[in-house]
Image (cartoon, rainbow, N blue to C red):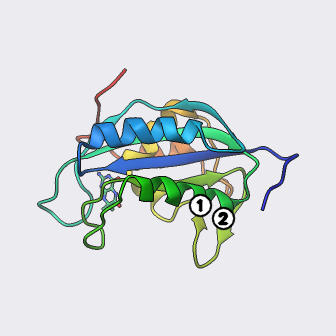
Amino acid sequence: MTDMNNWHLCYIGLGSNLEDPRQQVSSALEELTALPQCRAHAHSRLYRSDPVGPAGQPDYINAVACFETTLAPLALLDALQAIEQAHQRVRIQHWGPRTLDLDLLVYGDQIIENERLTVPHAFMKERSFVLYPLAELASDLILPDNTQLSELLKNCPVGTLEPISQ
Ligand code: ROI
């Protein structure tokens, strides 16, 4: 389904900790720019982050991308999942290691809750590996529930998160 006259500003979180994570995230960033009905704006630096979830898995590489799209939310989700599949996504256990995760964090000012999609993303408010890259792109972002990104950052220590690219 499309909405050709309406461009929606979106933020996508990228994460990988398997199969050359840096390369996974870099090439996914390029693939996002090539999606139909999307115009890419910017992406954050790449970050190295300690895993959230079961211990003993490799470190993650994370980033956030920003673009506009005329794709409806579920059509965008399909497109993101097609990219994940193309990376032969492996997800062995819940909250375990994965080849590539693409999370729709924010879709304009919409609040979406259905069986496939929760937007804004359910855990983004407490995850440094989402909030700090996001703040690079939109430090004054206000979520649809009126939460300010700057307030979320105050409650979310940067910890060991570190940028690894310019
Ligand atoms: N941990 C980090 N650091 N980065 C991620 O992208 C990430 N993604 C996940 C879980 C398994 C929750 N942990 C993560 O899905």
Q: SS for tag 1? A: helix
Name which residue type carries label 2. Leu
- Ligand 1 quarter of the rendering: bottom left
The residue identified by callout 1 is 77
Q: SS for tag 2? A: helix
Residue 97, percent across and down? 25, 60
Name which residue type carries label 1. Leu
Q: Most extreme residue toward the right, as rendered?
A: 5
Is there any visible trace of residue 59 in the rendered image?
yes
Considering depth in this image, is 114 or 21 the residue closer to the camera? 21
Residue 67, percent across and down? 63, 39
Considering depth in this image, is 138 or 2 the residue closer to the camera? 2
Q: Residue 159 carries which label?
A: none
In this rendering, the answer to whether 95 lies above or below 108 is: below
Quadrant containing the N terminus in the rendered view? bottom right
Q: Residue 74 carries which label?
A: 2
Determine the residue positioned at 71% across, 50% down.
Answer: 108
**Is 39 left, or right, of 77 in this rendering?**
right
Determine the residue positioned at 39% across, 35% down.
Answer: 26
Q: Most extreme residue toward the top, as rendered?
A: 166
Occupied quadrant, residue 119: bottom right
| Label pair 2/1, CB-CB below 8 angstroms | yes
**Is 72 left, or right, of 131 in this rendering?**
right
Determine the residue positioned at 33% across, 25% down.
Answer: 165
Is there any visible trace of residue 134 in the rendered image?
no
